[in-house]
Amino acid sequence: MSKHDDINEQNPEQAGDLHDSNPIDEKGEGPEGDNTSDILSKIGFSKKDKGKKDHDHLKQENEDLRQQVGELNDKFLRLYAEFDNFKKRSTKERIDWFKTAAQDVIADLLPVLDDFGRAIKQMEATPNTTGIKDGIVLIQNKLQSILESRGLKAMECVGADFNPDLHDAITEIEVKDENMKGKVVDEVVKGYYLSDKIIRHAKVVVGK
């Protein structure tokens, strides 16, 4: 009789515990013999299937990331273009504002300049006013010089073709010279530019 049989006879329950503590599967392997392949095969997968799924998952993530990068790059380029256009537009507006910042002041001074011109014409028709005339001409020239240094420029209208973008026709008169038809024959009120921008149209008489 072996020692193992003796244990079975003396204590059957203990013998049963010994059998249970070291079960043997059909392949002769205990729990230590089980591995990942056995577990995956029991649920219908293999290591190859698992690796393929991981590869497909990583590939999809990579494609998603590429798409997101492309979309972000496209948004960046659009925003940069919009900002560049805004910067150029703002710069142009700022330059235009500086050029015409004094427009209202200069426009208010134009009637004074007109009065000087009328006064000089009146004195030309009056004798013995040479001294007064010279003084007024000096003041007029000084004022005109200051305004011109700020960008003011008078229109040259007499003899030019009538242009509704520049001239306001007060009336039309018959002219003998065929070359003066449709042209400005007289200037009632001067027109002016400020930095090449029209701030007052000339009031003119047109030949017909």
Image (cartoon, helix red, strand yellow):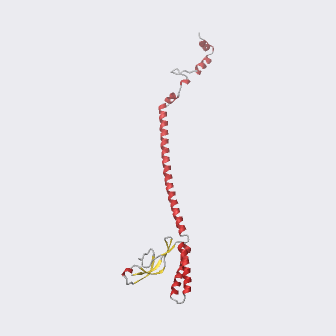
Residue under the point 55% across and 73% down: 104
The quarter in which the C terminus is drawn is bottom left
Residue 14 in view: yes
Estimate the x, y position of residue 64 in percent, counting from the top left: 49, 44
Estimate the x, y position of residue 99 in percent, counting from the top left: 53, 68
Estimate the x, y position of residue 29 in percent, counting from the top left: 53, 21
Q: Nearer the viewer, residue 23 or 66?
A: 66
**160 over 75 or under it: above or below:** below
Q: Nearer the viewer, residue 61 or 42?
A: 61
Estimate the x, y position of residue 134 in percent, counting from the top left: 55, 83
List the single residue furthest toward the top.
1
**94 over 60 or under it: above or below:** below
Q: Is residue 173 left or right of residue 86?
A: left
Q: Nearer the viewer, residue 61 or 33?
A: 61
Residue 44 in view: no
The quarter in which the N terminus is drawn is top right
